[in-house]
Every structure is written in structure tokens, then in C-alpha cells.
Amino acid sequence: MPLFKVAIVGAGPAGYFAAQALQNQQNEDRTFAIDLIERLPTPWGLVRSGVAPDHPKIKTVSKVFEKIAADPNFRLFANVEIGSEISVAQLKEKYDAVVIATGSHLGKSLGIPGEELPGSLSAADFVPWYNSHPDYVDVKVPLDCDTAVVIGAGNVAMDVARMLALEPSELDPTDTADHAIDAFKASAVRDVYISARRGPEHAAFTSPELRELPKLEHTNVVINKEDIDAAIVRAGAEPEKEVKSNLDAMLLIAESQKSEHERTMRFLFQHTPKQILGTDRVEGVVYSTPNGDVTIKCGLVITAIGYQAAGIDGVPYENGKVVNTDGRVNENLYVVGWAKRGPSGVIGTNKSDAAAVVELMISDLKTPKAAGDISQLLTHQVVVDQSAWQKINEAEVAAGEPKGKPRVKSVKRDELLKLGLS
């Protein structure tokens, strides 16, 4: 039975679902040996460092990842960086197929004056900061102001706004980074604006996220009912299902607003940012609106307007994505997930995406190479394999139990390596 070796670069949802798709395609004619390669000492990608800590149900997909990893033909090579330590060309030489699944973790910029001021940062830095990502522990998040502005109209923007507007004690039973919980508890922020360039009918929020907002126990959520009424008219008599669900959820918020709490999250629609004001730090945002320019005074601005992929030497990129045709990049090189299609969809979207690319790959496979694998290229790297990751995972979960948390994540590479390799 032919055994094909496949290297997957990136151990987030797209990488695991690509591995699962390969496992599902095994039969009497072919089997797959899968090596999942990850730059960080820990796998799971955005499930670990992107999903909001107060949404633990979404993180249960990690159980699927662990089942995929239990296959005897699956190996994890974490703490190994492709592009610097090992080249894509070297992987292509040794494997029958190489799959790029590195996601998109660089935040897009607004391109307006003042964006470089202290107190202006991207959700691409803020989200991993509160999620214990080792590369973002030292991000400076000034929370010494009473007002913060989040620019964006998707679920990431809503997560960011919610994390800023929550009563911080609500994060105690979550796996939010300890340094972030301490910072939120000392925060002076009480008003959080979430601003969208277009009207509510164009917002990229999902209705389940919107329907969670009225359940916040210590935060007022404010939407102008006139904005929603006008959006309903513009959407027409037969709006798309997702648009109707969103508008219904926003109308519910607009009609049942709370006002008794000291913390407030406010939605602004048809507000296009023109300039971030300030001299030594952020002092406000100037918006263009249908009624003229308005200024929101604030001390913190977080942009959540999309992500783009970081480049890897030997892989063609354009407009923040890997150049590809239906997932095929060039000879025995493929791409899945956000690196393929851009930051769209939910975690589960990566499953069907990966399955389609794997079918394409299988149609390209001929005879196994039998040319070795990554282990022959690892001369000095400290590798975290599946058993080492399980030690890290078990130690973090054990540390969380006495605190009533799902886990306490280690935030430094050396700490993680010590846990896994001890």
C-alpha cells in the first residue's frame, strides 16, 4: 500500500482539518504519514490564542484536534519555524506534498493620519496579548483612559469591544492571561465605542455573537434604534437570511437597552474614520458621517478591520494571501484556510475548505518519493512533539483547576519548553 508523506505548516484549525481530511481519504490504495509543523511551542492556533476567553464552548473543537493527533501516522513538530530554520524548498524535496496552513495574523492598517500614535493598536496585537501568546506578552495597552474606540464591524471587533467593556471579574473563571486580567481590573475604561464604516445591514457580525450581548450582566449595550429602522428599510422586503438575523438581533438590543451600569458598549454606524487625534498619545478619532464630521474623544483605539498572511520565503504572496488556484500553489505545494482565502468564515469553514484542497492534492499524487522527512533537517532545534505538548497541556489544565479555570496558560517560550521537555 503506497504511503505518501505530507507536511502541514501551521498547527491551527486549518492545519488540523487538513490532516483530518487526509486521514479520511485513506483507503486500500493509499495511506498518509502526516507531519504537522508549528512555529510556536504550542499547537491549536487561534483556538488557543484568538478565540475570546469568555467563549469557552468554541474552544472545545480542540478535542477534535486531539483525536486527529492520536493517529499513529501523525507527528507534531512544534517550536520549529519554516522559512528561517528550514526552507519550504527543503520540505518540498522530502515530502510528496506540502500544505501551507499558517493563517493570517498581521492586522491591516487604516492608512489614516495618527495611526502610529501610542494608544493606537491592532486587534492582531491586542487579542493575542490577552490570550497569552508568547510573542505578545509585552504589548502596551493603555487602559488609563475612560473611553476606548474599536474600529471594525466583524466578530473580532465585537470580541475586542466586549473584553474592554466587561466587568473584569467575569474573566476570573476563564483562561484569559493573568497579566491581562490584572490590567483590566486596573482599567479606567468605562465607555467603549464600536464603529462601522457602513450601515447595520452590511455589518459582518454574526447573529449568535450579537444575541450574547444583552446577557452581559454589568454592561449597558446601546444601539440607536433609528439606525436599525433605516437599515431594515434599506435591506428591502426580502433581505438575505444572515442580514435579517443580524438586524433582528440588533433591533432587540435597540429596543431593550440597559442604562443602570457604569460600563457601556455603544455601536456607531456609518462612521468612517478620517484621523486619529493626539500629540504624544491618542486623544480622539475624527469620523466622517452622513451628517458631517464628528469627533469621539478617547485614549485608546483598536482597529479590527481584517488580517493578512505573513510571508514565508519560497511561497508567493499577493494582497495578504498565498497566490493559489483552488488551493494549488505550484508543484506539490498547497494552501488551506485563511492563508488561502483570506480571513473569512468561522472555525468550521476550514473543514470543508481543507477537504476540497486535499481532494485536489490526491488527484495530483503519483508515486511516493521516499525521500526522508523533516527529522533529517532538525540539527539544533528544540522540538516539542505530541507527547511534550500533552505534558504542557496537562500542566496548564492542572494549574487551572484550583482556580476554577479551564487552564492557566504559560506565556513564555522557555516556560513552555520546560513544562514539555522536563
Image (tube, helix red, strand yellow):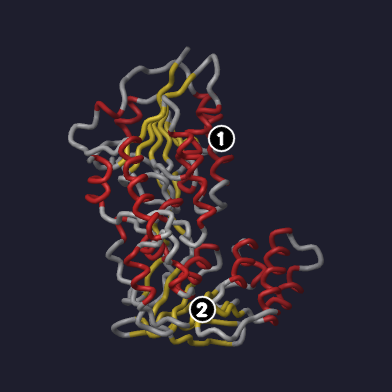
Q: Is residue 94 left or right of residue 309?
A: left
Q: Which residue is drawn at the image coordinates 50% and 56% (left, top)?
A: 56
Classify mark 1: residues with Cα within 10 Å, few (<14), some (14-19) or many (20+): many
**Residue at the extreme right:** 237
Marks 1/2 in contact by CB < 8 Å: the verdict is no
Name, please, the residue furthest toward the top: 1
Question: Element at badge 1?
Answer: helix
Residue on which the image places disc 2: 193
Which percent across, then down, holds residue 408? 36, 56
Q: Residue at x 52, y 75 (%)?
A: 194
Under mark 1, the amino acid is Ala
Task: Give the labeled residue for mark 1.
Answer: 355
Image location (x, y in percent) of residue 120: 37, 74
In the rendered image, is residue 86 in sight? yes
- Picture residue at 31% right of the left edge, 60% below the top: 136
Apparent side of residue 257 relative to residue 18 in the rendered image (left or right): right
Q: Position of residue 84 (x, y in %)?
A: 25, 42
Instruction: Give residue 120's mark.
Output: none
10 Å crowding of disc 2: few (<14), some (14-19), many (20+): many
Which kind of residue does numbered mark 2 sit on? Tyr
Helix, strand, or loop for circle 2? strand
Disc nearer the start of the sequence (1/2): 2
Is residue 48 shown above or below 235?
Answer: above
> Residue at coordinates 53% horizontally, 35% vertically from top-left?
357
Determine the CA span between mark 1 and mark 2.
39 Å
